Amino acid sequence: MLKTLLDKTFKFILIALIPSLLTAQNNSSLKKTILKLDKKFWKSYNTCNMSTFKTFFVEDFEFYHDKGGLTSGLTKMMSSVENGLCNPENPRVRREVVEGSVQVYPLNNYGAIITGEHVFYVSEKGKKEKLAEIAKFTHVWQHKDEQWKMTRVLSYDHQPTPQNTDIKEISLSDNILNKYIGIYQAPKTGTVVITNKGQLLEINAGKMNAIVYPQTENLFFHKQSPLTFEFIKDKNGKVSKIVVRENGQIVEEAKKVK
């Protein structure tokens, strides 16, 4: 009698587990499929293979971008990519996924959702490729007529990537920092205002509002861009100008006027 009871209990548990086991198997297969498609899609993006790139979307595709807004329709999307990202005259953009960030979820009676984070590298003619920004993405895949295609793409939370991460920050006294505060004038940037923000400096110039960190007594760096700011003194020991460098190259000089 005990054996019969145990057999019935085992059968009941097995029957109860079967749907969960089948779901897990199906989800695993779905994830492999979507990840494979995603890899092919981004390869076409990075290489500007327009003929392949186009095959991943439905005609009434919609692209939502936190900075660019909504792009409706495949025709408009293709025109935007061909004239922007893949225009030979423009800087090239390369995308890489952030390892460990990607998740795939089933979408009942429709397809699947893939979401994660990625970074973008930009390379201009004659210049070294540089890491530009990080963002989140969500793609909606539809399974219809034995084909997988994207119907909606969302790209959002674009942020500058951390820069100058190999530079060690030091602390400076207010007496030293106060030597750098004031108003500067630059030929391209215009008026530059520098203030003391508690052992750091704040630089305001046009639309730029940046906190910079001391690397040495007279050299400061920005954590959100590859910029450094070097304060130069005259023969009397007074600060006379700032030399601004981007990726080590001088891009601006600002003379202190007040």
Image (tube, rainbow, N blue to C red):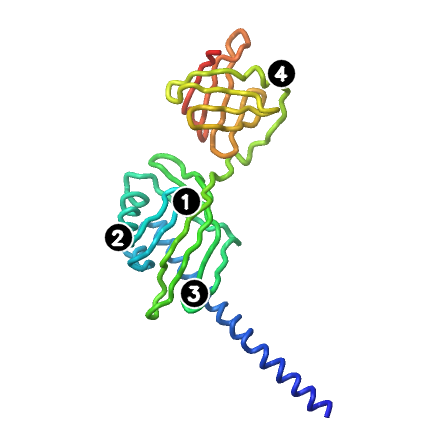
Q: Which disc, if any, is residue 175?
A: 4
The amino acid at mark 3 is Thr
* Alpha carbon separation for disc pair 2 and 4: 60 Å
Local packing at callout 3 (Cα closer than 10 Å; few below 14, some 14-19, many 20+) is: some
Could you tell me which secondary element the residue under label 1 belongs to?
loop
Q: Look at the picture and state if 132 lies above or below 72.
A: above
Write the residue at 42% across / 44% down.
120
Could you tell me which secondary element the residue under label 4 belongs to?
helix
Write the residue at 34% across / 50% down.
47
* Alpha carbon separation for disc pair 1 and 3: 28 Å
Write the residue at 60% across / 29% down.
169
Q: Nearer the viewer, mark 2 or mark 1?
A: 1
* Mark 4 or mark 1, earlier in chain: 1
* Alpha carbon separation for disc pair 4 and 3: 61 Å
Could you tell me which secondary element the residue under label 3 belongs to?
helix
Residue 228 point in image, percent of width and height = 49, 27
* Mark 2 or mark 1, earlier in chain: 1
**Circle 1 sits on which residue?**
66
The amino acid at mark 1 is Asp
Local packing at callout 4 (Cα closer than 10 Å; few below 14, some 14-19, many 20+) is: few
**Circle 3 sits on which residue?**
33
Residue 230 point in image, percent of width and height = 50, 21
Closest to the observer: 53 or 59? 59
